[in-house]
């Protein structure tokens, strides 16, 4: 019986207590980028949040197309819906 109790106690997981980590503060890079952004409606039908100016650029077919620049998803240029 003692062997069974000892085997049961040794098979239980041991909890390791870790010291609480201090709360993380947002990095300064993200804090700087979050100023001055705006939501736009992309040509794909999704909303995108971009920091740069809206520009008119020629498309592959030769037409002019409005694009938002420097978006939060990492895209440099996102075509906009008219």
Image (cartoon, helix red, strand yellow):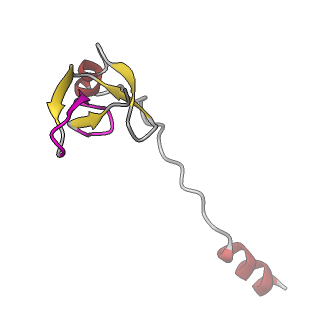
Q: Nearer the viewer, residue 56 or 4?
A: 56
- Outermost residue on the top side: it is 36
Q: Residue at x 29, y 20 (%)?
A: 31
Residue 62 is covered by the magenta coloring = yes
Residue 26 as seen in the image, left or right of residue 16: left
**Against 12, is 22 above or below?**
above
Task: Pick the quarter of the image with the C terminus.
Answer: top left
Specify whether 53 is left or right of 10. left
Residue that appears at 32% across and 18% down: 37
The span picked out in magenta is 61-75
The image quarter containing residue 15 is bottom right
**Which residue is found at the position 71% from the left and 73% from the top?**
9
State the count of labels: 0
Closest to the observer, 50 or 55: 55
**Residue 78 sits in quarter:** top left
Q: Whole-percent x and y of residue 45?
A: 46, 38
**Vertical order, 29 against 17 (above or below):** above
Q: Position of residue 24 (x, y in %)?
A: 38, 30
Quadrant hosting residue 74? top left
> What secondary structure predominates along the stretch shown in magenta?
loop
Residue 64: percent from the left, percent from the top? 19, 31
> Which quadrant does the N terminus fall into?
bottom right
| Above or below, 74 relative to 51 | below
Residue nearest the observer in this picture, 62 or 73 = 62
- Magenta stretch: includes residue 56: no
Of residues 8 and 50, which is closer to you in this image? 50
State the residue lying farthest toward the right: 1
């Amino acid at each position: 019986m003692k062997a069974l109790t000892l085997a049961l106690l040794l098979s239980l997981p041991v909890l390791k207590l870790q010291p609480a980590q201090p709360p993380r503060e947002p990095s300064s890079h993200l804090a700087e980028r979050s100023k001055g952004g705006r939501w736009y409606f992309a040509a794909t039908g999704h909303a995108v949040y971009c920091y740069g100016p809206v520009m008119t650029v020629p498309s592959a077919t030769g037409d002019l197309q409005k694009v938002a620049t420097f978006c939060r998803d990492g895209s440099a240029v996102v075509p906009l819906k008219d």
